[in-house]
Amino acid sequence: MKDSEIKVLVKESYGKIAMTGGSCCPTKGSCCGTLPPEDISKGIGYSEEEMNSVPRGANLGLGCGNPIALASIKEGETVLDLGSGAGFDSFLAASRVGPAGKVIGVDMTPEMIKRARENAAIGGYSNVQFRQGDLEDLPVEDKSVDVVICNCVINLVPDKKKAFEEAFRVLKPGGRLMVSDLVLRQKLPIRIRESIEGYVGCISGAAMKDAYLDAIRSAGFDDVEVIEESAFSLDFFVSDGTDQPAGQSLGMSREEVREFADSVSSIKVRAIKPR
């Protein structure tokens, strides 16, 4: 599948997710399974307090970790949220930077941008703005942000190195990168690698762990460190809308499903732009 085809597919699928309002799995494919968004978010590291502090509908359960938890965001800083979706992480960051700080959310899906802006208005977030754009070509000025966060979105980007280069470009010297994402410990079965559902479900586009970390380093970052790593539950993966286990809708055998489950890790990675 061509990179351009993948981007169109992802944009269309997540546009549908944005428009459903209450369900994060309206079609085949998303970074969530059949569990409610709140259960998924709790399972990947968000507290009840964090989930209750944002407008209803901002949390779609699409992440694979909590980048806010380890980003050490300070008052007055400018934070960039890559693949900001309906605004969940952006709003959590906004409460940390305070009125003197600023949060910029970037997402390539018009429907997500519209929903995030509506949520910002409901929550009265005057220090948050949302911009439509690609992660490989960010609509953000050079050396203008203190922290870049991203929650399970780089795996959807065909050119991961370019995405990290863009994050490096917009960070101030000494700025921090904190990413939660899915990576591979071993190659996926070919059935998943070539499936449409796999690409949209944050699976087929995931890179091998070493290649992912090398892409961050090659973009210019120093002190690249995996802060946390854990297995990623099959309950959080793509389903076909009929509550079938992940992989069953792709016609995988039980053995293939077990192999698939052992292939994917959720990691939190921190890196620094040299001064």
Image (cartoon, rainbow, N blue to C red):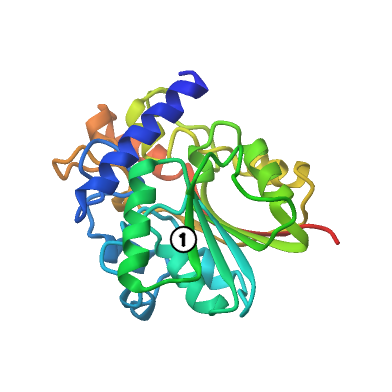
Residue with the most extreme left position:
242
Which of the pair 167/262 is nearer the observer?
167
User: Would you name the residue on which mark 1 appears?
Assistant: 65
Q: Position of residue 226 (x, y in %)?
A: 64, 59
Identify the residue at image location x=64%, y=72%: 77
Q: How crowded is mark 1: few (under 14 residues within 10 Å), some or many (20 or more)?
A: many
Identify the residue at image location x=76%, y=46%: 217
| In the rendered image, the vertical position of residue 47 relative to residue 185, given as above or below | below
Of the 4 image quadrants, the one containing the C terminus is: bottom right
Which of the pair 69/145 is nearer the observer?
145
| In the rendered image, the vertical position of residue 77 relative to residue 116, given as above or below | below
Which of the pair 222/256 is nearer the observer?
222
Residue with the most extreme top position:
2
Of the 4 image quadrants, the one containing the N terminus is: top left
Which element carries disc 1, helix, strand or loop?
loop
Q: On the picture, is 266 further left or further right than 44? A: right
| In the rendered image, the vertical position of residue 194 relative to residue 60, given as above or below | above
Residue 84 lies in quadrant: bottom left
Which of the pair 230/63 is nearer the observer?
63
Q: Where is residue 67 in the image (x, y as percent from the top left)?
A: 53, 64
Residue 143 lies in quadrant: bottom right
